[in-house]
């Protein structure tokens, strides 16, 4: 183990080799950074192709006013620096993490009355994301008829593997997935733990139940409901 002291916004100054890390882990640190875009770009540059940024942090349901963001107490409590979740997603994508995956989340209960008065109606959440450095990820979940079978071989996950909040893959079960999810399992450190079915030779449209539907009238067609996707 080696400890390095530096600025999280300037990871390139620490003498670390670009594209040399399999995983970068962070716990409630990025929200304290004044330049979150630089942090994400730096992490992306350090990761190997197929590498992952796995991190927990605090998010908000809205953009916070300057009075909240500049308050030293709120900032120190990991509230003033919290990102609006719908600003975080495009920020992550601009850094190269094209399909952020939410693993877990829960609301934060602010009990301190003085802090509650300062933040008003803003709601805060603790959330864990995994961001993969993968070329070829698409903006939406596209269906290529692919599936995976989990071998149950990851430590502490013999019965099922949880990729994210929408993908709990039981051991031994054929599990249909979209193209992005297939890449997250086939082109990363997880590949040895899965049997991977299919390729990208045939496209079947948007993956069912992914929150993105065909915008045209479909009275004569019934969409398939098989599989699971974000």
Image (spheres, helix red, strand yellow):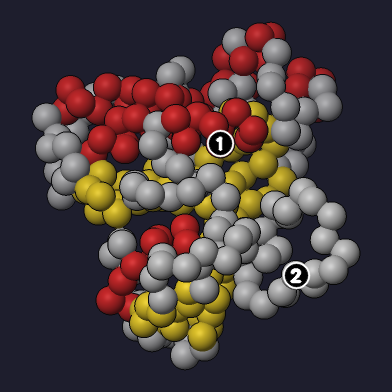
Q: Are marks 2 and 1 in contact (CB under 8 Å)?
A: no
Q: Secondary structure at mark 2?
A: loop
The residue shown at (60%, 10%) is 70
Name the residue at the right extreme: 219
For label 1, the residue is: 89
Quadrant of residue 26 within the rendered picture: top left
Judge the density around disc 2: few (<14), some (14-19), many (≥20) Cα neighbours within 10 Å.
few
The residue shown at (41%, 67%) is 201
Viewer-proximal residue among 40 and 111: 40
Name the residue at the bottom extreme: 172
Count how many numbered circles sit on residues in the image.
2
For label 2, the residue is: 223
Q: Residue 73, image x and y in percent?
A: 61, 19
Question: Can you say which quadrant of the picture contains the C terminus?
Answer: bottom right
Q: Secondary structure at mark 1?
A: helix
Q: Is residue 2 left or right of residue 133?
A: left
Residue 84 position (above or below residue 194):
above
Residue 71 position (above or below residue 173):
above
Q: Is residue 183 left or right of residue 88?
A: left
> Could you say which disc has been placed on residue 38 in the image?
none
The residue shown at (64%, 52%) is 105
């Amino acid at each position: 183990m080696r400890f390095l002291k530096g600025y999280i916004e300037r990871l390139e100054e620490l003498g670390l080799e670009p594209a040399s890390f399999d995983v970068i882990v962070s716990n409630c640190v990025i929200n304290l950074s004044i330049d979150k875009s630089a942090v994400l770009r730096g992490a992306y540059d350090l990761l190997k192709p197929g590498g992952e940024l796995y991190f927990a942090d605090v998010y908000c349901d809205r953009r916070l006013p300057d009075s909240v963001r500049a308050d030293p107490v709120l900032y120190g409590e990991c509230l003033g620096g919290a990102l609006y979740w719908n600003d975080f997603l495009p920020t992550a994508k601009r850094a190269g993490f094209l399909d952020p995956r939410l693993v877990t989340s829960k609301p934060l209960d602010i009990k301190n009355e003085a802090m509650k008065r300062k933040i008003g109606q803003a709601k805060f959440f603790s959330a864990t994301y995994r961001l993969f450095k993968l070329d070829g990820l698409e903006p939406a979940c596209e269906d290529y008829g692919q599936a995976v079978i989990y071998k149950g071989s990851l430590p502490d996950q013999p019965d099922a593997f949880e990729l994210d909040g929408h993908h709990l893959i039981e051991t031994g079960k054929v599990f249909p997935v979209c193209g992005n999810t297939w890449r997250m399992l086939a082109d990363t450190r997880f590949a040895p733990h899965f049997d991977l079915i299919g390729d990208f030779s045939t496209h079947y449209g948007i993956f069912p139940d992914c929150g993105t539907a065909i915008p045209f009238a479909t009275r004569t067609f019934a969409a398939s409901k098989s599989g699971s996707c974000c």
